[in-house]
Amino acid sequence: MTTESSPETELQVYGVRWYLLSVVSLNCCLQTAVWAEFPPIAQSAKLVYDWSDSDINMSLNYGNIGTIVLLPPMIWIVFTKGMRTAVILSTFLMAAGTALKALPVGNDLNSWLIPIGLFLNGCAYAMTAVGATVLSETWFPPSQRATATVIYIISAAAGGALVFIVDSYEVHEGLKVLNVTECSISVLLFISVILHFPNKPPQPPSVTANTQRLGLVEGFKTALRQWRFWHLALCCAIPASVFSAWITTTEVVLHPFGISQPLYYEIACENLFPVSEAVISGLLGFLNIVSNTLFLLVTIIPNIGTMWLNWAVFVTSLLSVVVLYLFKEEYRRMDIDLPVSQSEDSKL
């Protein structure tokens, strides 16, 4: 399929793009905080819920499994219905999941409600895995696309860092406050998205934002057949997923010793254009979550220990550096957008 664009289309950016980025970034931050809530307080959670190390690691996998289940239909929703429908569904699922975690019930019932809540939060994260590059491409000009994606991704890291705050509080009260706060913010996000979150601006911010993408099936086939996609997946997606899983389990890993990102989404979109950003982000996110899940599943093998976790991070990180060094990047979107952008600037 050939791509078509309309160079004559008037390009324009809208201030509301920063509001939309703030909403989805806060959504991403909160989802990550919910996902990574228990490993930083592993020893306390074991006492409160009578959990084992395997239970702590599985608290991460409930979310991963939810993401894997909903990611394929979420790619289709973003591709066919747009970001509004996807973000509404995502914020609703997160609100439902955090509400289950915040219910004032006994620990026995919590042992069932918490996994269900984490699973729903993982389902909500499917939009986050897809939406970063779609939002930046749809609403931001070429000079700001990478910045928007950086803010979006950094919000996930911020969410992972926030969960360590609860370790400063008395365990029972800290968990109650955290769960109620998560639920309250989730409901507010859901309401704000219902009130205002358009699919796309009246006028596109760049030429490629108005360029027809390959069809969903054709886009999948094109991406999976290209070595460029697998090159970036091997050097970034898989090592990043292993590292993110490892960093959230450091409390478990380091306890026996008495010790209590980059932008591969954007470069993948540049190199695989005109494959849709939803397809690319979805595929990379899928590989990320699957690798993350497999990594965590190994930890439930009896007597496997924890030192292999550190070696896995070292080996995959070293491998990613080698593969990234060999990668020859292209900037297919920027080659189209920059000349137009410079021409527009010269008219001002």
Image (cartoon, grey):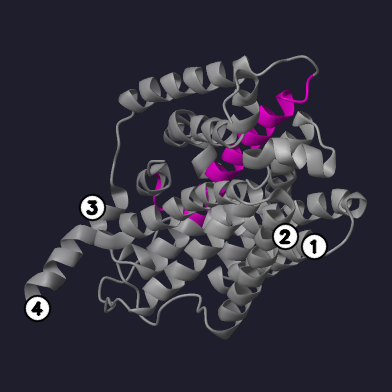
Mark sitting earlier along the chain (1/2): 1
**Residues under labels 4 and 1: Cα distance?**
54 Å
At mark 2, the secondary structure is helix
- The amino acid sitting under disc 1 is Leu
Label 1 vs label 2, nearer the camera: 2
Mark sitting earlier along the chain (4/1): 1
Let me know if residue 281 is in the magenta part: yes
Assess disc 3: are there few (<14), some (14-19) or many (≥20) residues with their C-alpha within 10 Å of its C-alpha.
Answer: few
Magenta range = 272-301
Mark sitting earlier along the chain (3/1): 1
Mark sitting earlier along the chain (4/3): 3
Q: Residue shown at 38%/44% (left/top)?
A: 263
Instruction: Tell me the residue that label 4 is attached to.
Output: 348
At mark 4, the secondary structure is loop
Q: What label does residue 335 carry, if any?
A: 3
**Residues under labels 1 and 2: Cα distance?**
12 Å
Label 3 vs label 1, nearer the camera: 1
In the rendered image, which quarter is residue 178 located in?
A: bottom right
**Residues under labels 3 and 2: Cα distance?**
51 Å
Q: From the viewer's perspective, is residue 265 above or below residue 106?
A: above
- Residue 238: image location, x then y, percent: 53, 31
Instruction: Tell me the residue that label 2 is attached to.
Output: 176
- Residue 189: image location, x then y, percent: 59, 73
Let me know if residue 192 is in the magenta part: no
Label 3 vs label 2, nearer the camera: 2
Q: Residue shown at 65%/29% (left/top)?
A: 252
Label 4 vs label 3, nearer the camera: 4
- The amino acid sitting under disc 2 is Lys
Q: Are marks 4 and 2 in contact (CB under 8 Å)?
A: no
Q: What label does residue 100 carry, if any?
A: 1
